[in-house]
Amino acid sequence: MSSQFLDRLNPEQREAALHFNGPLLVLAGAGSGKTTVLVSRTGLLIEQGIARPQDICVLTFTNKAARELKHRVADRLNLPGPALTAGTFHSFGLRLLKEFSSHTHLPKRFGILDSTDAQAVAREQLRSFNHSGKVSWRYDVILSYVSRLRERQLVFDDQTLDTNPPELPDDPYAEAAEWLLPRYMKRLIELGVVDFDSLLLLPVEMLKKNPGVRAEIQNRIRYLMVDEFQDTNAVQMRFLELITNDEKNIAVVGDDDQSIYGWRGACIRNILDFPQKYRGCKVVRLERNYRSTSSILQLANTVITRNSDRHKKNLVAESKKKNAPVPEVLVFETDDEECEGVLREVLRLKKEQVPYREMAIIYRSNSQGALVELELKKAQIPYCITGGMAFSDHKEVKDLLAYLRCAVSPNEVAFRRAVTTPSRGVGGVTLDGVFENLNRNKIGLHSFMHSRTNAQFFESPSGEDAHASKARAAISEFVNQIGELRIALQKSEDWHGVLMRFLEKVGYKSYLEHLHKDVSSFQKRWALTETFCQIFDKSGRKNGRSLDTIAQFIEFLELRDDGDEGGSPTEVQNDEVQLLTLHASKGLEFRAVILIGVEEDLLPHKTLGTDISEERRLFYVGITRAKEQLILTHCRTRRRYGRLRPVARSRFLQDLPGEMLKVWEGGFRPVSGDERKNLVANFLSQLNEKILVQET
């Protein structure tokens, strides 16, 4: 077969791209070109007339990966944009819920709760919960328990499954979660919203209970593909089973050696057991690595082979670069010396013409990065901490989304946030009364806000006290302002200007000034709102200025990526040293990697890493980020609880043959002859300058 999609593929990539029918498992080692395989297989299905674009569904863990795949396929086929479905599990789940909302308890216009609002709902419900000895809760923890209970009820109660459900710990949180679950779900229904978990759990429930809907989806998706399959959890696996048709044309791509999200529910058994679950499954191994040198890969292979329960594969370097440096271990007496040594390495790499953006300092937990950050800051070296807060997680963005949602398709959560930001003298009790009144009179929130037939609601009844009358007037004013915003957005071609004027009118800028007394802090917050307005206006220019576009814009920002680690970039723009955790480093690559703190209790981590096999996979991921230079560090003593305490090097280092690494005690490598001459010359020059100064 001759095709542009087969050009420059290696034999294994070609084998995977040409397997069209029946189950397929592509074991894609680090740096082996898995995206190329997904693009080529998708393009070939369309180009060869085997499938129409609308017959294909590709599920990923980030929207960016889905957009890249669609763009590359469309570009090669000279199409404006193929109609294939490509997106995250949750975005596809949302799509199904919107299309088949009549088969669920959801209203046609439902909202999506972010984690902050979901915790607020949990906090509201738990006020009625009595538990001896427990008065303060971490609501994120309770909701994680609730998620596991929902998963257990929906997925593991299925008699067709032979997987055992994860056990909940016997503690106060488990008891609270069991009490909270029915009340939490009832409140979501009352609010007409879904939380993030529901975007998959509800479609699974719907597909299980409605054979007709299930058959329609299975007929629609003739070819199903899944990226990063090693990161799927039990719910996602059940979802895939329900949408896969009898032909079993399901192709999954992943690497069990890079399965590092067990702590958040990822099930490595999904990829390990896939060939047994799908009889006749073809398995293709991509072992040619296009990223790292052979010495780095030799080290990585040796590390990961210590894990026994895995699909066997051995990475081989395609790069034939000569004189590539051997991975090194720098040993320091203290963690302070380690930070100083890391700074020396950064300066050395810069001297060797490695750009800052091609250097990464990687660690197991965020606390390790603080000392290194301080050292870089003192040396005025530009750096970036990967994994900061995502744009849509900022309070200001959530506030503006609430305003826009009220203008387009209001729900109770958005209304409560918007009407109280900034404060208008409207409290929770008043709002409870508003919604009780609306429910009693069977008036929808959309009608209440955008229909003048409810004007009588804003008339103060005789005998109403001054506080209630003031609150009623404030709500009336807010509803009018939102109505004006809606009309202005429908008429104007300048959404940026409309939204900025609205924010000024409702006092949002003054509210931020009052909230952030520091001028610099306020300016950053206000700049964030201006950025939001610019992005909002760009959406209107690109997609048309309509209420539907606004609704899609809100949905886009509310629906975060499945694999979002808080804004981890996959492309670095500025010339800055990258500081990031091992988890945040997955999927990235750098010319030089400095992996610090390779010690017992840190890597593997004493409290965070309960699964040694997964901790080893995490170490493997860190190693395979390096393209040319890999530097590992560990200390003999590290400061803990104010005292220097002895620490041991990681068992992962002890497992490695000595010839694979160069170990430098004290963190200093030997100086070459020329370097020694330069150092002596510089020393003598500086000494002469001091003598001259003293003589004068």
Image: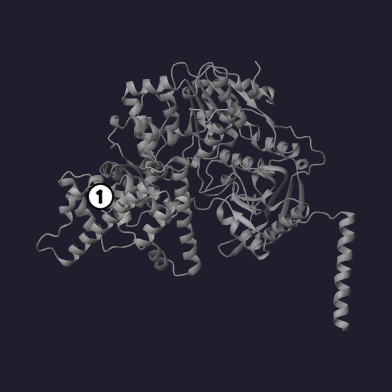
Q: Which residue in the structure is indicated by mark 1?
A: 449
Vertical relation: 106 (above or below) 493: above
Instruction: Name the foreground residue: 418 vs 381.
Output: 418
Kindly indicate the quadrant of the structure image that contains residue 166. top left
| Horizontal side of residue 17 vs 658, given as left or right | left
Image-based side of 37 in relation to 10, left or right: left
Q: Nearer the viewer, residue 124 or 15?
A: 15
User: Could you say where residue 21 lies in the image, as x and y percent from the top left?
Assistant: 53, 16
User: Dot 1: what SS?
Assistant: helix
Q: Which quadrant does the N terminus fall into?
A: top right
Residue visible at 32% across and 54% down? 417
Q: Residue furthest bottom?
A: 696
The furthest residue to the left: 462
Q: Position of residue 347 (x, y in %)?
A: 74, 57
Residue 428, relative to residue 565: is it above or below? below
Q: Is residue 641 above or below residue 144?
A: below
The residue drawn where x is 85% and y is 82% is 694
Left or right: residue 590 versus residue 134 is right
Q: Quarter-wise, where is residue 201 in the image? A: top left
Q: Residue at (50%, 37%) from the top-left corner?
A: 61
Residue 122 at least partly seen: no
Q: Position of residue 588 (x, y in %)?
A: 62, 42
The residue located at (57%, 48%) in the rendering is 605
What's the amino acid at mark 1?
Answer: Met
